[in-house]
Amino acid sequence: MSELIHPDRLSFWKAVDRLVDEHPVVIDRPAGFAHPRFPQIVYPLDYGYLDGTRAMDGDGIDVWLGRQGGSTVTGIVMTVDLHKSDAELKILIGCTQEEMRVIEVHHNGLSQYGQLLVRAEHGPV
C-alpha cells in the first residue's frame, strides 16, 4: 500500500501562513461597518479576504485583522451558517486573545455557529 501523506508535508499552520504570506489581505468591511444585507450585524474588527484565493462559497478566503496587524496567523474560526447552508474557515491575523473571543462571539448568533481554534503559541482563549 502506498503512503498517502508525503513525509515532507506542510503542517496545517505552516500552510495557512503560506496562504497569508502569498496573498494580499483586502479589507472590504472595516471595524464598525454594518453588513450590507444584515445591518444589525456590525463588524467588531477589520474583515476581508485573501485576494487570489477561493473559499467554499467561491469568494476569497475570509480573514479578520486584529490590532497587532502584520501577517501572524493567531487562529481560525470554523463556521456553519444554517441560513446559507454552508461552512467556512475564517483566518485570524494579528489578533489578541480578547479580539479572538470577540470574533468567536460574533460568529455565534442568528443562524451562524462558530468554533475558535487558537494557534498553540498564542495561548488559550
Image: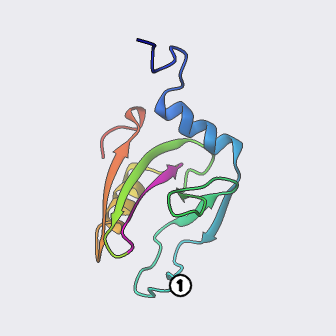
Q: Is residue 120 left or right of residue 52?
A: left
Q: Position of residue 7 (x, y in %)?
A: 50, 14
Q: Is residue 21 magenta?
A: no
Q: Is residue 89 magenta?
A: yes
Kindly identify the residue that appears in the image at 44 percent across and 50 percent down: 96
Of residue 98 and residue 112, the one placed in the foreground of this image is 112
Determine which quarter of the picture holds residue 62: bottom right
Q: Is residue 112 above or below residue 90?
A: below
| Segment tinted magenta in the rendering | 84-93
Q: Position of residue 36 (x, y in %)?
A: 53, 84
Q: Is residue 104 left or right of residue 21?
A: left
Q: Is residue 60 above or below residue 97?
A: below
Q: Position of residue 46 (x, y in %)?
A: 56, 66
Disc 1 on helix, strand or loop? loop
Q: Is residue 124 above or below residue 115?
A: above
Which is the main secondary structure of the residues drawn in magenta? strand
| Crowd tier of the residue under label 1, counting other residues whose Cα lies within 10 Å: few below 14, some 14–19, many 20 or above | few
Q: Position of residue 42 (x, y in %)?
A: 45, 79
Kindly identify the residue that appears in the image at 50 percent across and 58 percent down: 56
Determine which quarter of the picture holds residue 110: bottom left
* Residue that badge 1 annotates: 36
The amino acid type of the residue labelled 1 equals: Pro
Kindly identify the residue that appears in the image at 40 percent across and 86 percent down: 40
Of residue 6 and residue 125, the one placed in the foreground of this image is 6
Q: Residue furthest front?
A: 1
Kindly identify the residue that appears in the image at 40 percent across and 11 percent down: 1
Q: What color scheme is it?
A: rainbow
Of residue 18 and residue 43, the one placed in the foreground of this image is 18
Total numbered labels placed on residues in the image: 1
